[in-house]
Amino acid sequence: MEKLTFLGIGPKIARITIPYLAIAIVLTILFPQVFTFGKVLREPMLIAGIIFLLTAVICYFLTLRLMIPGLRNNRLVTGGMYSLSRNPLYLSLLLLLLPGVGLVMNSWIVITASVVGYLLFRKFIHEEDEMLERIFGDEYLKYREGTPMFFPNPFWKK
């Protein structure tokens, strides 16, 4: 029987997103006049960034709390954060953590790392979908039909 894996497509996303993020951070430090929103927005961006980062950490750990037992027992997790998005770990990293870092740094180019990561997520997520369908069959197909792939949507048909 095929077993679930912890990393999934994460390394494929990270292989490009992390170097991009590093370059964006260096550019922001070297050329703040080009890559930041300006000194006037520094404080509001910092506050917003801290809120994003705290939310990311909370979402990430709430998801891990559900995911790790699911991996150990090779069972499909559909509750908690997984009832809002089929990919809450990627969501917390790409939609909250990366933008949070950019906001804390007051850097528009750092925020674009989130877009790069999301595009890579979209390119590779079919691999995880196919694996979950192989392992869980109809149970996963039903879950997939009733739960958004990434962005939580209260109007999603259930």
Image: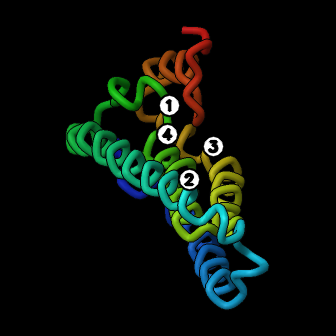
Kind of element beneath mark 3: helix
> Gap between marks 4 and 3, in whole Å?
12 Å
Question: In the figure, 29 relative to 51: above or below?
Answer: below
Say which mark, if any, is on residue 38.
Answer: none
Total marks shown come to: 4
Q: Please tell me which of labels 2 and 1 falls first in the chain.
A: 1
Q: Please tell me which of labels 2 and 4 falls first in the chain.
A: 4
Q: Which residue is mark 2?
A: 94
Say which mark, if any, is on residue 126.
Answer: 3
Q: Residues within 10 Å of mark 1 (few under 14, many from 20)?
A: many
- Label 4 with label 1: CB-CB less than 8 Å: yes
Q: Tell me the amino acid under the disc marked 2.
A: Leu
Instruction: Please tell me whether mark 3 or mark 2 is closer to you in this view.
Output: 2
- Label 4 with label 3: CB-CB less than 8 Å: no
Q: Residues within 10 Å of mark 4 (few under 14, many from 20)?
A: many
Q: Please tell me which of labels 3 and 2 falls first in the chain.
A: 2
> Gap between marks 1 and 3, in whole Å?
15 Å
For the point 33% across and 24% down, the residue is 79
**Which image quarter: residue 130?**
top right
Kind of element beneath mark 4: loop
The quarter of the image holding the C terminus is: top right
Q: Please, which residue is most extreme toward the front here?
A: 40
Instruction: Please tell me whether mark 1 or mark 3 is closer to you in this view.
Output: 1
Say which mark, if any, is on residue 87.
Answer: 4
